[in-house]
Amino acid sequence: MLKFGTGGWRAIIGDEFIRTNIIKVAQSLAVLMKREKVDHHGIVIGYDKRFLSDKASRWIAEVFAGNGVAVNFIEKVSPTPLIMYTVKSFACDYGLAVTASHNPADYNGIKIFTKGGKDADLMVTAKLESIIEELHEEDILTMPFEEGIKRGIIRTVSPFNDYVDTIISMIDVEKIRNRELKVLVDPMYGVSKAALQTVLITVRCEVDVINDRHDTRFGGRMPSPTKETLGKLRDMVREGNYDIGIGTDGDADRLGIIDEEGTYVTSNDIMSLLYYYLLKYKGWRGPVVRNISTTHLLDKIAEDFGQRCYEVPVGFKHISSKMTETGAIIGGESSGGLTIKGHIKGKDGIFAAALLVEMISVTGKRIHEMLTHLQEKYGSFYMHEENLALTAEKELELKERLFEKKELPEEFYPVEKVSYEDGMKIYYKNGGWIVARFSGTEKLLRVFVEMPTRREAKKLAENFLEHYGIYN
């Protein structure tokens, strides 16, 4: 049975990601749209540079055309946030992107979006799973792509300019122009180059780009902007005296930053900087939303400005829903995705990068200087992360010990509380915490630890793994 995770449906190409399953997902969504009587609003379909994305998007369009659902087919490879923006601007109830985001190159998948350009929530994906389970081969209706074009039920659209212009309208163009910043961009062989380069050149930044050719193997590395994968960007920023280096993941909904000194800036720090910037320099007021494995520095910043920080499970759909509910001005996660109030309700690495460039320009301060200020003001927050591939037997054993028996590791610090809302999270009285949860997009156990010192964070993670008999 096909299962949706925290970021849509993802699977290994040639294993589960095959035409039979791809068109099942499309047919299930067409059925759901008809049941909800929103099929007359049409659907937006887009795709990225991954292997099979272009063909899969056409197979999907053929299913919707066969079901009589109008298709707005984005004709060029596109960032996921651009596709989400198009769902919002076209006032469609549903849209989808063929992408596996930051997963390894042998994966592909489908992300489902709902009204306003928002990630589909658990209720929607549960309905789709149920429909898929009941589908038979004869239930799947298709129409050849070219016939759909001729009949006008499939139309190609190009929302690139509208998306880029919207981002430009939301940033302080004059302040950025006056700084004449030098920026190095690494799309990681993904789809951010055109949009990000256009935005930055428009505001008069000097822009250079690396790793931008079409390579479905992503240069042999994970298309995720981490400290380990952005080594070339880091070296070139330092050697070329750039003001900032910007890396985006495969579908451009996440970003990683290299500061002017060639130092990798964590996603936790990026979000903390932007929340502080919105409150302190732009005068915005409102809460912040983070997931369970994102820094509690956000809690400190919120408290300082008389605001509140809301914690939700992993999955950006939870963040966007809580932002809508609470009126939060920013929401994000430690894996590099965030969004700002007034934009789309999903992650956008391109807009986040533009806002960071604005922050540097408006404050007149470099990223390293601002991070030092936050540390002096709110204290130190160090995160350590472990991603572990387990055998099926070990996974079953751990799930039993963690979630059924609720066995806790040896207590090195006084415990404040324990939560099982999403995996297991232990909150310590010193402000630190540890999370253990199984990934919703890969076959991994993820362990996150945050403590006042790097040594404490690493040691706590090591002790946790040793207690449960997990070894790297």
Image (cartoon, rainbow, N blue to C red):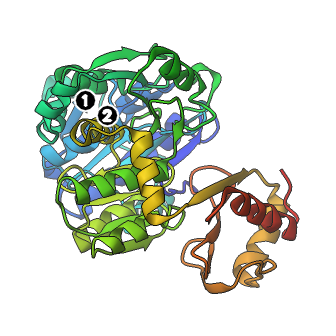
Above or below for 458 versus 110: below
Residue 58, visible in the rendered structure:
yes
Dots 1, 2 in contact, CB < 8 A: yes
Above or below for 184 versus 159: above
Position in image of residue 293 (x %, y %) = 54, 63
Horizontal side, residue 261 vs residue 252: left or right: right
Name the kind of residue labelled 2 in the image.
Gly
Secondary structure beneath dot 1 equals strand
Name the kind of residue labelled 1 in the image.
Ile
Residue at 43% across, 31% down: 56
Residue at 61% across, 71% down: 433
Residue assigned mark 1: 74
Q: Mark 1 and mark 2: span between their CA atoms?
A: 5 Å
Front residue (pair 11, 199) = 199
Position in image of residue 306 (x %, y %) = 27, 76
Secondary structure beneath dot 2 equals strand
Residue assigned mark 2: 46
Above or below for 154 versus 365: above
Horizontal side, residue 150 vs residue 105: left or right: left
Front residue (pair 385, 402) = 385
Front residue (pair 101, 97) = 101
Q: Residues within 10 Å of mark 2 (few under 14, many from 20)?
A: many
Instruction: Say whether disc 1 or disc 2 marks the residue closer to the N-terminus.
Output: 2
Position in image of residue 342 (x %, y %) = 17, 54
